[in-house]
Image: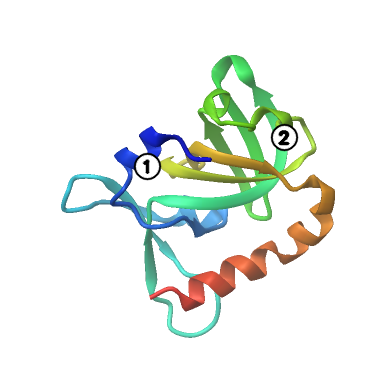
Amino acid sequence: MMGSSFLSADRARSPPVKVLSSQLREGTECQTAGGRSEYVIRRLGPGEQRSLQVSVVWMQGTVLEVQSDHNTVLILDETGNFVVSGINSVPKGKPCLSTGKYVMVMGVIQSHSPEPVLRAVKMADLSENALIHRKNWIYEVEDLQQILP
């Protein structure tokens, strides 16, 4: 369950968008009218390459390194590394934080370059069916991005 601070502080944010780390790395930062940072990324898939504005994302990948003392984890998806901060305050997040586990992370983008950094809101262990999740992930990302307005 998401913390009440996330819900109240981020009520105006859009729902999480499934993305790859390379999309964030190649994206550009912009400010909303309210002064909040958002990131403009290129959509995956064929057809017209409209951009997509995101601030809360859903990412998946394999845990490479856990640094509990720094409150971070390094994760690798199909397109590169990304860092997740705030791992010590995510409910039920710690059990999935061991090297080699395949996890999903929902979080607020903190930075996009040189590698993406998210502030974790939710984490889940997908290792039980990692092969299926890993194989389908890029298709899920592309499919969602193609149907979003």
**x 43%, y 43%: residue:** 108
Marked residue nearer the N-terminal end (1 or 2): 1
Residue 134, located in which quarter of the rendered image?
A: bottom right
| Residue where numbered disc 1 is placed | 7
Residue at coordinates 55% horizontally, 22% vertically from top-left? 71
Decide which of 110, 97 is in the foreground and name it: 97
Where disc 1 sits, the SS reads: helix
- Which residue in the protein does label 2 denote? 96
Residue 116: x %, y % from top left: 50, 43
Callout 1 amino acid:
Leu
At x 51%, y 37%, the residue is: 120
Q: Distance between the residues labelled 1 and 2?
A: 23 Å
Q: State the image coordinates of residue 7 (x, y, percent, origin top left).
A: 37, 42
Q: Which mark is residue 105?
A: none
Q: What residue type is labelled 2?
A: Cys
Left or right side of 132 for 45: left
Circle 2: element type: helix
Contact, mark 1 vs mark 2 (Cβ under 8 Å): no
Q: Quadrant for the C terminus, please.
A: bottom left
Is any part of residue 66 visible from this angle?
A: yes
Q: Position of residue 93 (x, y in %)?
A: 63, 32
Residue 111 shows up from this direction: no
Of residues 124 and 136, which is closer to you in this image?
Answer: 124
